[in-house]
Image (cartoon, rainbow, N blue to C red):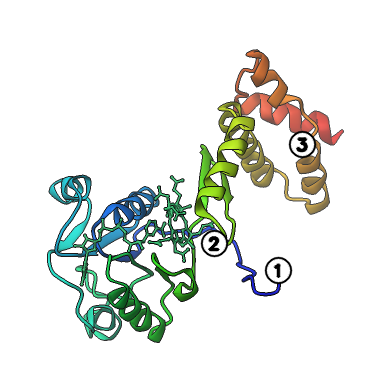
Amino acid sequence: MSDSIHYLPIMLDCRDQACLIVGGGQVAERKSISLLQAGAILTIISPTLTPKLQQLVNQQQLIWHAREYQTGDIAYHCTSDEKLSEFGYRPYFLVHAVTSVPEINNQVATEAKTYCIPVNVAHQREQSTFINPNVIRRGRLTIAVTTSGAGPLAGRYIAKEINQHFGNEYEIYIDFLYHLRETIVQKVSDESLRKSLLHQVMSLSILEEIRQGIFEPWNEQQIEHWINQSIE
Ligand SMILES: C[C@@]1(CC(=O)O)C2=NC(=C\c3[nH]c(c(CCC(=O)O)c3CC(=O)O)Cc3[nH]c(c(CC(=O)O)c3CCC(=O)O)/C=C3\N/C(=C\2)[C@@H](CCC(=O)O)[C@]3(C)CC(=O)O)/[C@H]1CCC(=O)O
Ligand SMILES: NC(=O)c1ccc[n+]([C@@H]2O[C@H](COP(=O)([O-])OP(=O)(O)OC[C@H]3O[C@@H](n4cnc5c(N)ncnc54)[C@H](O)[C@@H]3O)[C@@H](O)[C@H]2O)c1
């Protein structure tokens, strides 16, 4: 345990953030899809692309610079006077170094670190300032599994196990909790009352109802009724 890194798991809001991937192979494709799904504005620097990445370029879903990485590619975006311009000359929010050339990945990492930009290095975890977990999603529910780099395939296996225990009912359940909580926060200003309600929500048998196929989503009136009767 002593030589393992105690990684901090966090959830990043990447919407409209400029992100960079250097390299355009299979690994770049996987990381690109995750970033695009997260709403990032994605640039790829790479002389070649996979067919899927090429298709995303054709659909104008990402910006492609069809060339090799050059020192200064990251720095320029940090130091340009035009950094707040509409065309994206602003610091990258995060960077992936995923070429097949370790020396290039290392250069990308060094440059990103100079500007304190989080960087993931595909060929060598130790160079990375962040790593990617396996992800299971059920709507708003996200479950991330990592072995802290010990074995990505082991992480995948464990994620598959977890995947089997969390069916689609969780998407409906978490949606229900979200709307109920929104209304509680909106309508109940007393802090201790709010806290008590939020705890009571957890003892509802909604998940079971969804599993049995008898759950009907609550409308605004039903939610308010439940709040009023729970307060009494
Ligand atoms: C979860 C996933 C997410 C993602 O990539 O987005 C992910 N790797 C996945 C797949 C995968 N990775 C590798 C293979 C080939 C088989 C093998 O070698 O095992 C496969 C399988 C495949 O490609 O199908 C090889 C590999 N991976 C890393 C190194 C370098 C090193 O260990 O230092 C090497 C050797 C490279 C070489 O030697 O050439 C490093 C990392 N890989 C991580 C994440 C991070 C640790 C996560 C953790 O431990 O929890 C970390 C540290 C950094 C990072 O990349 O974030 C994704 C699952 C996708 C899915 O399940 O569908
Ligand atoms: N972290 C992970 O999950 C994981 C998984 C598998 C492999 N890997 C590692 O990731 C690396 C990439 O794997 P891959 O399967 O995507 O490789 P790949 O060969 O499919 O793709 C490499 C890409 O890098 C581009 N490239 C090469 N030189 C470049 C340069 N100077 N500037 C910009 N782009 C350049 C190539 O044009 C190509 O698009 C491998 O070296 C491997 O060690 C990591």
Mark 2 surroundings within 10 Å by alpha-carbon count, few (fewer than 14), some (14 through 19), many (20 or more): some
The residue depicted at 64 percent of the width and 31 percent of the height is 165
Q: Position of residue 198 (x, y in %)?
A: 76, 42
Q: Can residue 179 be seen in this view?
A: no
Side of 80 relative to 224 (left or right): left
Q: What residue type is labelled 2?
A: Gly
Circle 3 sits on which residue? 202
Circle 1 sits on which residue? 1
Q: Are marks 3 and 1 in contact (CB under 8 Å)?
A: no
Determine whether the residue tagged by mark 1 lies in a helix, strand or loop.
loop
Q: Where is residue 113 in the image (x, y as percent from the top left)?
A: 41, 82
Q: Earlier in the sequence, mark 3 or mark 2?
A: 2
Q: Which amino acid does label 1 sit on?
A: Met
Q: Earlier in the sequence, mark 1 or mark 2?
A: 1
- The residue at label 2 has a CB less than 8 Å from ligand 1: yes
Q: Can residue 123 be seen in this view?
A: yes
Q: Which of marks 3 and 2 is in front?
A: 2
Determine whether the residue tagged by mark 2 lies in a helix, strand or loop.
loop
Q: Distance between the residues labelled 3 and 2?
A: 35 Å
Side of 157 relative to 229 (left or right): left
Q: Quadrant of residue 69?
A: bottom left
